C-alpha cells in the first residue's frame, strides 16, 4: 500500500496515518513531523524551515522533497508507506511520481481525502494549542494554513482524481469510526 493522505490542517492526517501505518505494517512518513524534529534539533534545515512554518506558509519544495526521498529510499519503505502532509502542491506530486520510478517502486495506489470543515478544524487546533502548544496553532496562523491549503494543496484532489486514485472520507466523528471508513473505501 502506497498512500497519500490529503486534507486541511487538523483534518486528522497524523491521527489516521498512525493507525493506517500500524494496520498495514508500513511506515508513516510525515514531512511536518520531520520538519518539527529538525527545528527542535536546531539544524540548518530546521532554521530555514522554522520561519515558513511559524507563518503558516509552505517550506521550500527542495527541502521537503529531500526529506521524503531520503526516507522512501530506506528499506522499511520498500513494501509501502503512508504519506502525511506530502505532497502539498502539484510540483511535489509530480516529483513524487518521478521519485517512485527512480527508486524502482510501484506508483501511488490511493490518495485519501479527509473532509473536515473549517469551523471544526479551528476548534481542534485551538484545543491542541492549549494541550501541546504547537507553534503554528495560533488562530491567525491556522487561518493562513487553511488559505495555503485551499490555494496550493486543494488542486491535488484533481491531480489524483484524474489518475482514478482519489477517495473521499468524511473526517468528522470518532477516530475509530473514521479509520473504519477509510478501510472500507480502500477495499473498493
Ligand atoms: P503539518 O505538520 O503537515 O501540519 P498540517 O497539515 O497543518 O496538519 P496538522 O498536523 O495540524 O493536522 P493533521 O491533519 O495531521 O491532523 P491531526 O491528526 O494532527 O505541517 C506543518 C507545517 O510544516 C506546514 O504548515 C508547512 O510549513 C510545513 N510542511 C509540512 N509538509 C510540507 C510540505 N510537503 N511542503 C511544504 N511545507 C510543508 O489532528 C489535529 C488535532 O485534532 C489533534 O489534536 C487530534 O488529536 C485531533 N483530532 C484528530 N482526529 C479527530 C477527530 N476525529 N475528532 C476530534 N479531534 C480529532
Ligand atoms: Mg499532522
Image (spheres, grey):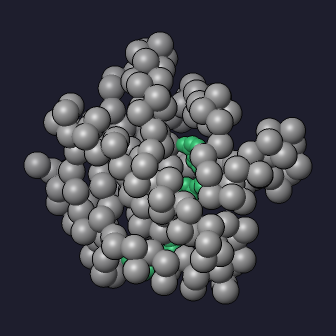
Corner quadrant of residue 119: bottom left
Q: Position of residue 84 (x, y in %)?
A: 48, 50
**Residue 26 seen by the camera:** no
Quadrant containing the N terminus is top left
Figure quadrant of residue 61: top right
- Residue 47, x across and y down, in percent: 84, 46
The answer to whether 8 is drawn above or below residue 104 in the figure is: below
> Does residue 121 appear left or right of residue 177 in this picture?
right
Which of 27/153 is in front?
A: 153
Tell me the quarter of the picture where residue 145 sits.
Answer: bottom right
Residue positioned 38% across, 44% down in the render: 4
Residue 49, can we see it? yes
Q: Nearer the viewer, residue 39 or 136?
A: 136
Tell me what residue is drawn at x 30 percent, y 65 percent: 115
* Residue lying at 44% horizontally and 75% vertically, measured from the top left: 121
Number of numbered callouts drawn: 0
Compared with 81, 151 (above or below) is: below
Please say if 84 is above or below 97: below
Horizontal and vertical percent for residue 9? 49, 63
The answer to whether residue 134 is left or right of residue 172 is right
Q: At x 57% / y 85%, what residue is drawn?
A: 127
Whole-percent x, y for residue 167 in the image: 21, 51
Amino acid at each position: 500500500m502506497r498512500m497519500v493522505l490529503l486534507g486541511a490542517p487538523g483534518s486528522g492526517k497524523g491521527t489516521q496515518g498512525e493507525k493506517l501505518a500500524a494496520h498495514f505494517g508500513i511506515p508513516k512518513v510525515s514531512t511536518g513531523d520531520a520538519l518539527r524534529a529538525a527545528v527542535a534539533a536546531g539544524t540548518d534545515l530546521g532554521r530555514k524551515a522554522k520561519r515558513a512554518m511559524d507563518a503558516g506558509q509552505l517550506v521550500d519544495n527542495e527541502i521537503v522533497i529531500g526529506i521524503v526521498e531520503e526516507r522512501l529510499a530506506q528499506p522499511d519503505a520498500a513494501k509501502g508507506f503512508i504519506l502525511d502532509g506530502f505532497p502539498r502542491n502539484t510540483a511535489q506530486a509530480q516529483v513524487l511520481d518521478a521519485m517512485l520510478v527512480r527508486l524502482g517502486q510501484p506508483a501511488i495506489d490511493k490518495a485519501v481525502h479527509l473532509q473536515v470543515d473549517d469551523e471544526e478544524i479551528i476548534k481542534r487546533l485551538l484545543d491542541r494549542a492549549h494541550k501541546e502548544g504547537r507553534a503554528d496553532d495560533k488562530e491567525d496562523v491556522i487561518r493562513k494554513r487553511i488559505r495555503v491549503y485551499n490555494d496550493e494543496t486543494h488542486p491535488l484532489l484533481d491531480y489524483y482524481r484524474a489518475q482514478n486514485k482519489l477517495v473521499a472520507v468524511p473526517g468528522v466523528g470518532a477516530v475509530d469510526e473514521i479509520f473504519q471508513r477509510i478501510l472500507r473505501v480502500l477495499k473498493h
